[in-house]
Amino acid sequence: QVQLVESGGGLVQAGGSLRLSCAASGRTFSSSRMGWFRRAPGMEREFIASISRDGKHTAYADSVKGRSTISRDNPKNTVYLQINSLKPEDTAIYYCAAQIPLRVTWDYWGQGTQVIVSS
């Protein structure tokens, strides 16, 4: 069982930056692939970024590539998402998720943190 709690969302002006955090409980964090997703108003949830267990491999959606960085601190059981050059279209609820070993699905989700980017 993994419990995830996101934080760091808020209201920010276009062009600004945010760092989202996701604190995980449970002993499987360091062996889990972690990801960030978002759901904009009226839209489907979309993948944003993922990071491997050891932090060496990352992947990004085209919508945030080049202005986002996903990272993790395994001793702190925390994964981060830094987003720079924020745009109004980045407005969404951001969720972190965990993919435990030997699974291909994202099995555990946080409750989300709201990000609003004003123009």
Image (cartoon, grey):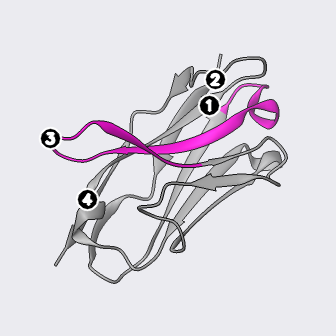
Q: Residue 13 appears in which quarter of the rendering?
A: bottom left
Label 4, residues with CA under 10 Å away: few <14, some 14-19, many ≥20: many
Element under label 2? loop
Check residue 50 for magenta coloring: no
Give me the disc on residue 42: 3
Labels 1 and 2: the sequence-earlier one: 2
Q: Marks 3 and 4, Cα distance to the nearest angstrom?
A: 11 Å
Pick the front one: 5 or 90: 90
Is 20 or 34 nearer to us in this picture?
Answer: 34
Q: Residue furthest bottom?
A: 15
Magenta-drawn segment: 25-49
For image coordinates 41% across by 61% down, the residue present is 63
Label 1, label 2: how far apart the Cα atoms are: 8 Å
Name the residue that disc number 2 marks. 2
Q: Which mark is residue 51?
A: none
- Which of labels 3 and 4 is toward the front? 3
Is 70 placed above or below 96 here? below
What amino acid is at disc 1? Ala
Residue 42, magenta (yes or no): yes
Helix, strand or loop status at disc 3: loop
Q: Which mark is residue 91?
A: 4
**Do the residues under discs 1 and 2 have CB atoms within 8 angstroms?**
yes
Query: Which disc number belongs to residue 98?
Result: 1
Q: Nearer the viewer, mark 1 or mark 3?
A: 3
Residue 24 horizontal/vertical position (percent): 64, 36
